Amino acid sequence: MKQREVIEFLREDHRVLWNVVGELKESQIEGEAVLGEWNVRDIIVHVTAWHWEIIAAVERLLEDNPPWVFVDGEDEFNRRKIEDKRKVPIERIMVEWHDAYYALIRRIEDLSDEEWAHSLHGKWENGSPISVQSLFEYRYRGKGHEGGHALQIKEHFSV
């Protein structure tokens, strides 16, 4: 996908998740588990953390370094990020989510065509080249990251 297409794709995903979350009561957002042990609040924290992580991955790739280096793996990354925000008020969580989303969009917009196409010599596990562009090919439940989680939440609460 081209940068503009990725931006539009991410905008639609964000809009969908925003609308789904907007249909929920605060007790639904902070209450029952929707995904494993995660409630909607935890999902928002998770998405926010990954927005920042993708921005960092872009920077690492542009410096010819591998995109993700987790000492403990993705599950531990997610657990830590959610635990770190456990006592943060939901209003702040929502602001941080939007801040991370807009920072990600700005970072994509700021990439030159050369930076967008920049790749490492390695390949992903599926054999495709590791490039800045490839960081945005992730699909979850047939949607983007936010859209996939929006679908889960929507199904869980029948909204």
Image (tube, rainbow, N blue to C red):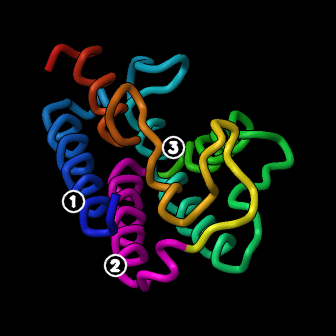
- Marks 1 and 3, how far apart in space? 21 Å
Disc 3 marks a residue whose amino acid type is: His
Q: Quadrant of the C terminus?
A: top left
The image shows residue 42 at horizontal and vertical percentages of 48, 36
Between 154 and 110, the residue placed more toward the observer is 110
Contact, CB < 8 Å: mark 1 with mark 3?
no
Callout 2 environment at 10 Å: few (<14), some (14 to 19), or many (20+)? some
Q: Which residues are magenta?
A: 89-117
Q: Is residue 95 magenta?
A: yes
Residue at disc 1, secondary structure: helix
Q: Amino acid at mark 2?
A: Glu
Could you give the CA–CA distance between mark 2 and mark 3, rounded to whole angstroms?
23 Å
Q: Helix, strand or loop at disc 3?
A: helix
| Point 62% across, 75% down: residue | 59
Looking at the image, is mark 1 or mark 3 nearer the viewer?
A: 1
How packed mark 3 is, by other alpha carbons closer than 10 Å (few <14, some 14-19, many 20 or more), is many
Q: Which residue is mark 2?
A: 109
Q: Which residue is mark 3?
A: 46
Name the foreground residue: 69 vs 41.
69
Identified at 25% across, 68% down, the residue is 4
N-terminal-most mark, 2 or 1 = 1
x then y, percent, for residue 55 = 53, 68
- Magenta segment: does it hold 112? yes
- In x, y percent, where is residue 23? 13, 33
The quadrant in which residue 94 appears is: bottom left
